[in-house]
């Protein structure tokens, strides 16, 4: 049986229900999802990350986390949106969520990053499901960290465990993760209500 660290347990427990609700509501996760649903998903993910990704990863992180390698997911999404046919000006004009999480403490940063890094774990499953509909396109977002995916996740959890070494830190990280998930879910729901096609 997998041994779950106190930090990971706290983060999982705080976000499990939100995570399950979000996954169940996403059109891109439906059985008949294809290119259009995936492009809409990318547009919405871009809009959520746009206001805070740089600020998150430019903060003070443990060297073992290799933050610079994790810091360009907006660039991955932009690469995919251009491949889908969007012009740079169209991407820059996409709606943004305006989510600005508190990132003053390591606990807050780990909580927000948990949501982003955890999403990368799901890219392999999503990629396999969407592959027939997307071929021959192999989107950068779905490649994630490639063969290093598992290693990146393990190093994230190891750093979180070392940093979130008190009950207070774990509570703060869990609250930040739950807030991030709630923000992401609300943003996707808002975009789905307003959307007629993508853009």
Image (cartoon, rainbow, N blue to C red):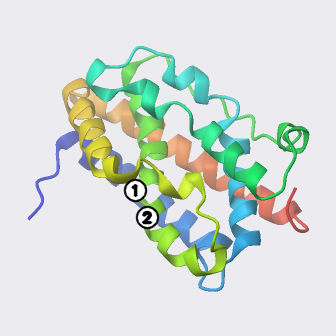
Q: Does residue 23 sit above or below 97 in this rendering?
A: below
Q: Is the residue under label 1 in contact with that under label 2 (CB below 8 Å)?
A: yes
Q: Quadrant of the C terminus?
A: bottom right
Query: Position of 191 compared to 175: left or right?
Result: right
Residue of label 1: 121
Q: Nearer the viewer, residue 155 or 166?
A: 155
Q: Nearer the viewer, residue 189 or 90?
A: 90
| Residue at horizontal 48 percent and vertical 74 percent from the top | 128
Residue 157 horizontal/vertical position (percent): 26, 40
| Residue at horizontal 8 percent and vertical 65 percent from the top | 1
Q: Nearer the viewer, residue 47 or 75?
A: 75
At label 1, counting other C-alpha atoms closer than 10 Å, the crowd grade (few under 14, some 14-19, many 20 or more) is some
The image quarter in which residue 47 lies? top right
* Residue 108 shows in the view: no
Residue 86 horizontal/vertical position (percent): 85, 51
Q: For residue 124, which numbered disc appears in the image?
A: 2
Residue 20 horizontal/vertical position (percent): 48, 67
* Residue 148 shows in the view: yes
């Amino acid at each position: 049986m997998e041994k779950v660290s106190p930090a990971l347990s706290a983060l999982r427990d705080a976000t499990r229900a939100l995570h399950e609700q979000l996954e169940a509501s996403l059109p891109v996760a439906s059985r008949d999802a294809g290119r259009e649903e995936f492009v809409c998903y990318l547009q919405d993910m871009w809009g959520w990350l746009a206001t805070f990704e740089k600020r998150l990863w430019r903060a003070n992180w443990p060297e073992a986390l290799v933050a610079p390698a994790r810091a360009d997911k907006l660039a991955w999404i932009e690469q995919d949106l251009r491949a889908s046919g969007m012009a740079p000006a169209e991407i820059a004009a996409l709606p943004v969520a305006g989510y600005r999480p508190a990132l003053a403490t390591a606990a807050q940063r780990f909580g927000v990053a948990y949501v982003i890094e955890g999403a990368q774990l799901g890219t392999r499953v999503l990629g396999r499901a969407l592959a027939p509909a997307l071929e021959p396109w192999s989107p950068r977002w779905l490649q994630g960290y490639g063969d290093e995916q598992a290693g990146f996740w393990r190093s994230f959890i190891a750093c979180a465990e070392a940093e979130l070494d008190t009950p207070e830190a774990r509570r703060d990280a869990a609250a930040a993760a739950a807030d991030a998930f709630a923000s992401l879910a609300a943003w996707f729901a808002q975009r789905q209500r307003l959307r007629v096609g993508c853009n």
